[in-house]
Amino acid sequence: MSNKSNSVMNKNKPTPAEVQLSSGKRLYSGKQMPSGVLLFMCVLLLITACSRRERLPRIAIAGIAIECSTFSPAKTVEADFSISKAEEVFSRYDFLAPDSVLRQKAHWLPAMYSRATPGGIVTRETYESLVNQTLEELKKNLPYDALYFDIHGAMSVEGLDDPEGDLILRIKKVIGSKPLISTCMDLHGNVSPRLAENTDLITCYRMAPHEDAMESKRRAVANLLERVQTGKGRPACKAWVKVPILLPGEKTSTRVEPAKSLYERVAPAAAREGVIDAAIWIGYAWADEPRNHAVVMVTGDDENAVETTASELARAFWDVRHEFDFIAPTATLDECLEKALASDKKPFIISDMGDNPTAGGAGDVTWTLARLLERPEFRSSKDASTSPDQGSYVSAITSPDQGSYVSASTSPDQGSYVSASSPRSVKLIYASIPGPKMVEQALASGIGATVEETVGAMVDDRYQPPVLLSGTVEFIRESDTNTEVVIKTGSMYVIVTQKRKPYHYESDFENLGIKPRQTDIIVIKVGYLPESVYNMRGDWMMALTRGGVDQNLLELPYRRIERPMYPLDRDMPDPPLEVKMWK
């Protein structure tokens, strides 16, 4: 080893005093250290440590994350949010673990982060409560050098347009105009000019499904730290481009073209000289608000590079607008079932898209479940012909106020299902339907008991009333927040929950004693499949079902979005794709 290396090692080696202090011993040149000297050294080390900590940039963390369908009758209240305050916020970010590099580079002062499963519009009372709590937490640790602003970007609030734009302005009134703000969003968020103007750095996910969510948040934080620590401060300019496209996530997955190639342009664009970050937002399709459309944003220090990059990405998006299509084969529910029943691949997964709770659906629409319960393939021969407790399913579908949907299950071309004399018994899992009364009855009766109770349609009964479900309790998974039970009826296993719940992981089924890979058909309230479920599929189709996130955007009663908008106005002329710049 060279002398230079030894010198470095000796330089970094703790002094005897540091060793003695750290070990708790009171030795001083071989003798007992005088108490006054020990006290002085302890105070000195404490002052040094505090001084070093104070030199680190003071960075706050705050945000509210939810996407809301304005086409759902559901309302989101404060109890629906998971709220983290102060030190609890760190658990949201693995890159800010105590021993992480980024954690050590700043004096982090997390205020409050609120997150909820997508749902209906947020009540004004809930929004004001969350905002006021956030502001009070921010006031506790003033002043700040910077803020990491973590939002989804598709929140809707009663009586308020552009909540995220409102939130960032109210935060700035508390922290002042000097702190640098870096924002990270879901690519299905909406970026209003007000939000764009009032954040300094901004980025969004580059993958759908969002496998890069944490990576994107880390990028937003790393960009923020780099600008603060180097003294570069605010970027010289920002570019914002409105792209008049409104598409559902199920047509814009980055797993397939054209979104795959479109989003592959983003990282190279962000790496250009003079550019800090580049981002493309698909936007959120199920909210009827003026800000709802696609957006491109680029930040950087070279005005020409920033403007050119934003223009190129926006043009690339517009040019492929006609190529977007569903990520998987898509059809009516009956057509999907026909394919699944004829398939030998397990599990054959069907997405019940119209009521996807993670897109903003109520999660309790019974339209699909009622039709599944009527199908003879999922009942024993006895159930199909003589069981009286199955009659309620038929009456639920043929009730007068639901007559418009009778043809979907009784049309002549679907009659083969009804008239089959000896239907094959096929195992099907349905995930899931809220039914707190059924859960309560199952808990009281126990596993193996026969139970009967109505489920679903407590929030969204526009398409189908509550369904009477009768069956055997197969499994109970108790929870303080959302107990789940599995009810077996015929060859169907219906997962009933206390409140709506998404099923995005294979473990969600395994935790209920279900082996999903050995099941013939699984119907899930979901859109495109999250990674875990996608990886276990044998085959997959998406069903055009009813609910608050109906995939047929042309049928939705938009009144407030800006027009013309593709694909609502399919033959609209090419837009100017003007680049709005802030310098």
Image: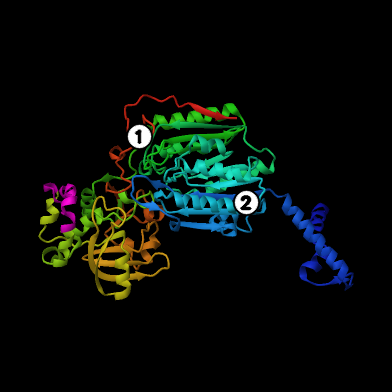
x and y percent of residue 59 in the render?
64, 49
Which mark, residue 139?
2
Type of residue at label 1? Glu
Frontmost residue, 191 versus 216: 191
Q: Residues within 10 Å of mark 2 (few under 14, many from 20)?
A: some
Q: What stretch is highlighted in magenta?
A: 395-413
x and y percent of residue 390 in the render?
16, 64
Tell me the mark number nearer the camera, choosing from 2 and 1. 2
Give the side of residue 350 with respect to residue 44, left or right. left
Q: Main secondary structure of the magenta part?
A: helix
Which mark, residue 323?
1
Give the side of residue 132 with respect to residue 392, left or right. right
Labels in figure, total = 2
Type of residue at label 2? Lys
Mark 2 / mark 1, whichever is N-terminal: 2
Frontmost residue, 442 versus 432: 442
x and y percent of residue 116 in the render?
45, 54
Q: Residues within 10 Å of mark 1 (few under 14, many from 20)?
A: few
Find the distance from the CA under tag 2 to the CA under tag 1. Answer: 49 Å
Q: Is mark 2 on a helix, strand or loop?
A: helix
